[in-house]
Image (tube, rainbow, N blue to C red):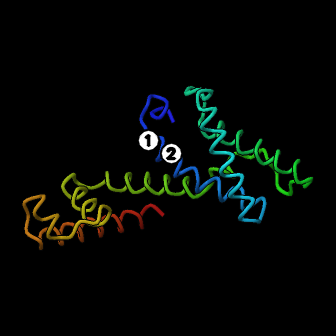
Amino acid sequence: MVRSLAGDGAAYAGLLRKLQTHLRAYYLRRLGRAADAEDLLQETLIAMHSRRATYDPSRPFTAWVHAIARYKLIDHFRRTKRRAEDPLDDPDILFGSEEANAAEAHLDVERLLHRLPAKTQKLIRDVRIDGLSTAEAAAKHGLSESAVKVGVHRGLKTLAGQVGDDT
């Protein structure tokens, strides 16, 4: 959001795409009707766009988005004379466990990789995380394909042994 406020249109477009997923799920859980959820999603994105200058970068972005989404949901309930069945004040419901779990997993992988020599870390990242083929990783690092395979295998085996020791 900060980059979009500075005029980065690509960052703003990416932000809106990511928010659509969260907002759609948030409204679907509360409303159960896809048509209503889509309507509220559009209303929320329009409200965010028209009020984006009110966002204070020193405050959490998720709280700002949650407040807008919550008010749009309350307005919808008022219009339809319906009561909320779930609490509306929990911002973790909008930005929940899916992103948090991914972030935690990424940090765990990074912590584990830092236990290995730098060369082995690079090989595992290239082949197992970034999806390079063994041949591509070999060319990138000036190694033979078999050296890459052995390096990745031994690195993963070392990590497996260390993880087993930690539990």
State the residue position of label 1.
Answer: 11
User: Would you identify the image quadrant in which residue 98 lies?
Assistant: bottom right
Residue 38: image location, x then y, percent:
68, 58
Question: Distance between the Cα atoms at labels 1 and 2?
Answer: 6 Å
The reply to whether the C-beta atoms of the residues labelled 1 and 2 are less than 8 Å apart is yes
The reply, left or right, for residue 3 in relation to residue 84 is left
Query: Up-down: is 86 above or below 75?
Result: below
The amino acid sitting under disc 2 is: Leu
Please give the name of the residue rendered at 88% of the width and 47% of the height, measured from the top-left corner: 78
Q: Which residue is mark 2?
A: 15
Up-down relation of residue 111 to residue 129 (above or below)? above
Up the image or down, 35 lies above or below 71; here it is below
The residue at 16%/66% (across/down) is 136
Quadrant of the rendered image containing residue 47: top right
What is the crowding at mark 2: few (fewer than 14 residues within 10 Å), some, or many (at least 20)?
some
Residue type, numbered disc 1: Ala
Q: What residue is at 77 percent from the left and 65 percent from the top? A: 32
Return the residue nearer the eye: 34 or 27: 34
Label 1 secondary element: helix
